[in-house]
Amino acid sequence: MVYVFSSIYSRYCVTGGTVDVSVHEKNPDGTLKVLHRPSGGPWGGTNVDNQYITWLANLFGRDAIKELTGEFMADYLYMLREFENKKRTVTPDLNQKIILRVPYALNEKCKNTEIQIACLNLEKDVDIFKDKIRVSADIAKSWFQESIDGTIRHLTVILSEPSMEDVTSILLVGGFAESKLMQDAVKMAFKDRTVIIPEEAGLAVLKGAVLFGHRPRLVSSRCVPFTYGYAVAVPFDDSRHSSEQMCIDSYGDRMVNNCFMKVVEIGTSVDVGTDIKAPSTLVLQKHKEEKVFIYASTDRDPEYITYPSCTKMGKLNMGYAPGETMADNKVQVYFTFGDTELNATVKFLKTGKVVSKTIDCL
């Protein structure tokens, strides 16, 4: 069975709110194989909150919202909590106005609310009385549209890839997955696939995290989200490198520093716990304490670690080179991907000494 796992988070008063998508295949032994690197975007329930606040700012004025958050933060948070509960009542078949509570101070600060409603042509859609506002179903549904459209577009892109043709099911979990609007939109957009929404979809992510904690080997393979490698020096090439890049190493050879040695490419499926051997050996420099600097990149094949796409993940201290010749000082680098971490290992080929470092990838 192959399925898409779409985790749609919804939290009020949280910066962000994301839709995270991953694709898994269920193995015969019950473990999961990751077929596509996790991806997503800012289309979760918090985006619906932002659409609501933006709509209120157009109605009451941006200054009124700014003053509310500056002077009456408790009222503002209460308004968002009320809206969080009300969001669950907005369904595809809703055809009547919904009542929302807004701080009375907000209405007081805006003296021209009726004029603004008329300017926005909302006389039939909006009624305001003290701390209550009645809004038409069409307006309430419009606050969800950007999140729904972003999610559907992203799922469509992923499922259009040739490698995804065997996907049979879409599993929606997370707080926003409880939205009937979101459920209906996904079912309409992907009629050829089974859409599964578990009971208490909002708790499914938490339950999954607990289960994963007890069974960390539940995922047998992963698709790496970045290109991983380490910093190396490569031989200077007159046809490729400028003279400013050239340096002389401890063996008297012309070299270029800060090059990216790729070990595994973004999107590659790797078995959890299996060593991945770097494509070439590394020669330690003489008479200096050496380190291997581990990098991740969003590019498939970065040439230098100085590219903006590259991020330093950590370093592995190896101590001093054991000999005087290049043959004495050769080491082999291995990467091993675990559940949420990367283990970098260096083996000294002449002495057999092994040095390792675990890097948290969360």
Image: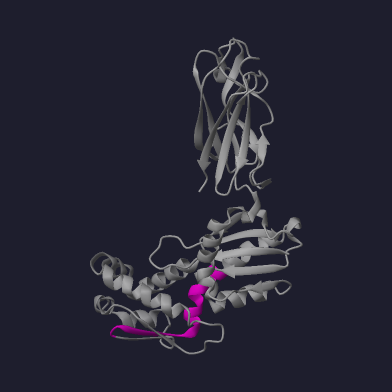
The quadrant of the rendering that contains the N terminus is bottom right
Residue 92 in picture, x, y percent from top left? 56, 83
Residue 161 in picture, x, y percent from top left? 72, 57
Q: Is residue 233 above or below residue 102?
A: above
Q: Is residue 281 above or below residue 79?
A: above
Q: Which residues are magenta?
A: 130-148
* Pick the front one: 336 or 123: 336
The kind of secondary structure the magenta stretch mainly shows is: helix
Q: Can residue 125 be found in the magenta stretch?
A: no
| Residue at the (50%, 76%) spot, across then down | 142
Which residue lies most toward the front here? 214
Residue 301 in picture, x, y percent from top left? 65, 37
Residue 300 in picture, x, y percent from top left? 65, 41
| Residue at the (55%, 36%) spot, across then down | 295
Q: Is residue 262 above or below residue 158?
A: above
| Residue at the (56%, 76%) spot, across then down | 199
